[in-house]
Amino acid sequence: FYLEQCPEAAEHPFGAVGHFLNEGARLGVVPQPAFDAGARMRRNPDAAVASPFLDFVRYAQGRLSAVTDRRSFVRESRSFDHPRAIAFAREHLAAARALADPPLVSVILPTQDRADHLRQSIRSVIGQSYRNWELIVVDDASTDVTPQFLAAYRDERIRVLDNPERAIPAALNRGLRAARGTYVARMDAHTVYPRDYVARGIERLSRGDVEWVTGPAVPAPSDGFARYVAAALASSLGQGGSSKWSQGGAGPEEIELDTGVFAGVWPRATLERLGGWHPDFHVNEDAEMAARVLAGGGRIICLAAMAAQYAPRASVLGLWRQYWRFGRYRALTARRHPIALRRAHLASAALTATVAATILPARPVAAPARAATAAYAVAIVVAAARASPTRTLRDIGGVALALATMHLSWGAGFIVGCARNGPPVGGLRRLLTRG
């Protein structure tokens, strides 16, 4: 396999493994051994399970340093032919080869009045294990200290652009036009990304069978009302049927996504072919783009290892506004792209209409609406009790309030969106024909 990727390895005196280790050490991909990994593996043959690739290369390097001819190499190599380590190494050889000349990735980070979270977000970019990057921060005419904060950075890899249009798609498209990288990653100012976010995204894209790689959203540990929102999002009633939310380590390593997406990494060519983000979608812009990708036969993958922590809203009013906008623009997305409509969306809109019907004077309508609303209240209290951080009445009430706010504001926004833009007839037809 390695010789197919690197034909020149056939000329190396110690063959493919020797070539791989030499190249890896030269590029800093393979660390120099700091201990006798071979002795470690002989004492505990299962040691490689935790990090088989690292154990494999460390041990191989340690053994190769003591041999001078091919015969000795063959004899020594037999002692580290740990099947799981070898399999893991083979899986990553192509990616290691790519690191010999890593393509540039352009990280686009739109921000508006998020100075309180911006420092952590930029640090998570600077700390990426993938070193060949440029960061394009697009400031949406912030009125806080964001401009002064960004002006203090003295890093030639970081560029700051102004976006007077004050809209996320316009900011993203401005960043895309300025991007020089082969790949593009979107990172948000209220989110902290894992150290290998970019590297894992590019490695998965390099296999050639997907167009978009992202990770799950994980609400960051918070205090105040934000911790109730975080707990609500950990509940199935808070996730709206979307697979983009973290499953707490219980889900598969890789899943296919629909239009529920959270940032991600793309080949720049894919974004340019799509024409960037649609300017009409000030919210739900990634979902709208995802609908176009899926309609064209593309695949969107979510890797559990790319999970990123974002800051939930810290007030009831802030949460209401956020989810009202989510619902309103999801209605527009579903109107234009039938694939974007899920049953959970209709359920949320129906719930909001049902709760609103409880105040109607007509008893034949109000009575069943009140009964349904009471059943809903019991359901969210039960869900809140299960998701609550401490199971105290205060926390259960806080989580229940967060769940109700998310459901009712989203449903209200969806109904308003349908009234303004027309109902998602194609999406309804699609759901009905699918059963």
Image (spheres, rainbow, N blue to C red):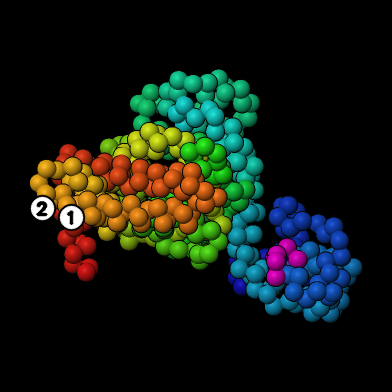
Q: Is residue 404 left or right of residue 143?
A: left
Residue 59 visible in rendering: yes
Q: CA distance from mark 1 to mark 2?
A: 7 Å
Q: Residue at x 22, y 68 (%)?
A: 434
- Do callouts 1 and 2 mark residues in contact (Cβ within 8 Å)? yes
Q: Give the vertical position of 36 relative to 83 (above or below).
A: above
Q: Amino acid at mark 1?
A: Pro
Residue 311 in picture, x, y percent from top left: 50, 40
Residue 50 falls inside the magenta stretch: yes
Between 349 and 383, which is closer to the camera in this rendering?
383
Residue 179 falls inside the magenta stretch: no
Between 435 and 426, which is closer to the camera in this rendering?
435
Between 369 and 243, which is closer to the camera in this rendering?
369
Residue 328, quarter of the rendered image: top left
Q: Is residue 41 left or right of residue 117?
A: right
Over which residues does the magenta segment extend? 49-55
Where, quadrant-wise, is the C terminus in this rendering? bottom left
Q: Which mark is residue 364?
A: 2
Q: Give the vertical position of 80 relative to 406 (above or below).
A: below
